[in-house]
Amino acid sequence: MTSQTNIADLIRDGAQEIVRRTVTGVEVSTALADFLNPLLVWPYVTGVISVPELGDGADAAYPAAVHTGANTQQVGGPVQTPAANVACVFHTARILTADELRTGYARIGAVKRLKRPPHPNGITHPMNDVPLGIIFCVESESSLEGVAEQIMALNRTTPSCEWPDMVVVLQKGTINYAVQFEGDRIKGNFLLPNTTDFPVMPMYAHVFARGVGLHSLNRMCGFLFMHLEIFSPGVKLPENAAVEGVSSMGMTLGAYQFNLKRELVPVPDEMRMDRGASLRNLPFRIETLKGNSCRTYSSFLGRKAARSGSLGRCHWRPCLCI
């Protein structure tokens, strides 16, 4: 594990090194693994794996993945790694194209949909045994906005429990999901759930793009370290130090909410107050039967109850705020 002193600067230097090495012909997956391994602690290692639950063949092999278990690569091939030990899978390419994005969705979805063993009884701390899925490229054919449009198009035909968690275009920026609870501002990063066994909450998941250039690697590391600390409780990684001094500003390019099946579905346009900076349910204007506005529902009830001893009747009219 590298010292946490100036860890953000070390990651920024690592981004430049990945760019330099891949220009000279080094595989993106190799450059990424060589960068990540010094930053990780036991029980994690980054390298080439093969997931036996996916069967034999090339589709079971992943050139870059963070996993628990063996500390060294098998001679002559990838490490055989059960799905339960896979903490993060990467799909890597030098240039992100529409075809590479589609392939990344399929490869990451294949690992995410694998069944994991049930959690042990008596667990009281947060657990997330689903692997993170990251599409990592150095450059892209499209702008970040164009990539986000392609992501949202693929989301329409892919179950939300199989979506990649983040797309990194190293020389441009990152796209991932940010959480916003009803009535609050957009907060932090959102880890996509891989289960339907959770209560539906009044929240939104934004498609959030940050055009931070080579600091994309800092953003990715902070996100990855957060997940790894949950995947293996007790592990300590510098998730905050990784993004120290890095801009958190970004742009929301789309938004989703959970339906009653616990699937993420697009937020309807009529629910958007100012195209993503804040999402609100439509407010109501409460009127008497004569059309007079009731300033507050409680004051209306109080006046009616005082006069007639009953709650009375009123009209509820939805109002659109622009």
Image (spheres, helix red, strand yellow):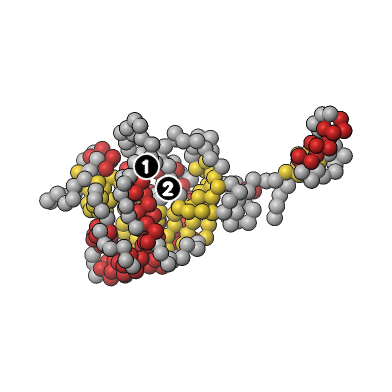
SS for tag 2?
loop
Which labelled disc corresponds to residue 128? 1
Give the percent coordinates (x, y) of residue 269.
Answer: 61, 49
SS for tag 1?
loop
Closer to the camera in the image, 24 or 18: 18
Image marks 2 and 1: residues in contact by CB distance under 8 Å? yes
Instruction: Identify the residue at horizontal 32%, vertical 66% (top origin).
Output: 5
Instruction: Identify the residue at horizontal 27%, vertical 43% (top origin).
Output: 85
Answer with mark 2 or mark 1, whichever residue precedes in sequence: 1
What is the crowding at mark 2: few (fewer than 14 residues within 10 Å), some, or many (at least 20)? many
Residue 54 visible in the picture = no
> Hey, which quadrant is residue 166 in on the image?
bottom left
Instruction: Identify the residue at horizontal 42%, vertical 42% (top origin).
Output: 193
In the image: residue 32, left or right of residue 184: left
- Residue farthest to the top? 309
Q: CA gap, disc 2 to disc 1?
A: 9 Å
Which labelled disc corresponds to residue 191? 2
